[in-house]
Image (cartoon, rainbow, N blue to C red):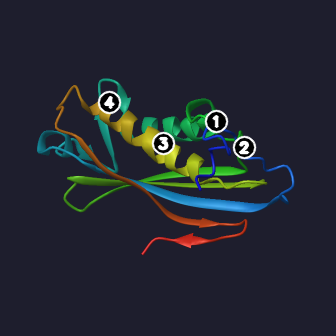
Amino acid sequence: MLSHVNAQGQPAMVNVGDKPVTKRTAHAVAVVTLPAELAALLHEGDIATKKGPVFQTAILAGVMGAKQTSSLIPLCHPLPLDDCQIEIEPSADGREVTIHCRAQTHAKTGVEMEALTGASVAALTLYDMGKAISHGIVIKEIRLLEKTGGKSHYTAK
């Protein structure tokens, strides 16, 4: 049975009232392919455009997005984030960028959606800032790598 559907088949928030507060962590990743003309602008770990430093702006946007997850995803519980870290790693040739978002909270429910949202918003910001150079940017993967806390742990294979 789906967790966000009640017995009548209607959308419903999951009741976490009786669950204990535990430390929860999640690590999500977004992979973005850059067209050659945008990758050519990569210098000293960032891409400079007229809009400003792309990676630095994407990092800020990712953290802001993670903090707003419950406003964006229906039925998602609002969580106080203890920490949210975004790292952007370009490949050796600069044609691919991996965005890592690690989120942590002490709460009654997991922080996976916050990590996934942070990585997604950072990737979308990279697209937005780079589209003046080329619309050939491809956000090709967004996925959860790991979650800890609560009843179950998950590590991607």
- Residue 93: quarter of image: bottom left
- Which residue is most to the left? 36
- From the image, tell me which residue sits under label 3: 59
What is the x, y in percent for residue 41? 21, 41
Q: State yes or no: discs 3 and 4 in contact (Cβ < 8 Å).
A: no
Q: Residue 8 versus residue 144: which sits nearer the camera? A: 8
Quote the CA–CA distance across marks 2 and 3.
20 Å
The residue depicted at 34 percent of the width and 50 percent of the height is 45
- Which residue is most to the front? 8
Crowd band around label 1 with a 10 angstrom C-alpha radius: few (<14), some (14–19), many (20+): some
Pair 2/4: label in front: 2
Pair 2/3: label in front: 2
Checking the image for residue 79, the label placed there is 2
Placement of 154 over or under 118, stated as above or below: below
Amino acid type at mark 1: Ser
Q: Is residue 13 left or right of residue 107?
A: left
Q: State yes or no: discs 1 and 3 in contact (Cβ < 8 Å).
A: no
Q: State yes or no: discs 2 and 1 in contact (Cβ < 8 Å).
A: yes
The residue depicted at 43 percent of the width and 43 percent of the height is 120
Total labels: the figure holds 4
- Which residue is most to the bottom? 157
Chain-order first, disc 2 or disc 1: 1
Chain-order first, disc 2 or disc 4: 2
Q: Is residue 75 left or right of residue 41?
A: right
Chain-order first, disc 2 or disc 3: 3
- From the image, tell me which residue sits under label 1: 70
Amino acid type at mark 3: Ile
Amino acid type at mark 2: Leu
- From the image, tell me which residue sits under label 4: 129
Placement of 45 over or under 69, stated as above or below: below
Crowd band around label 2 with a 10 angstrom C-alpha radius: few (<14), some (14–19), many (20+): many
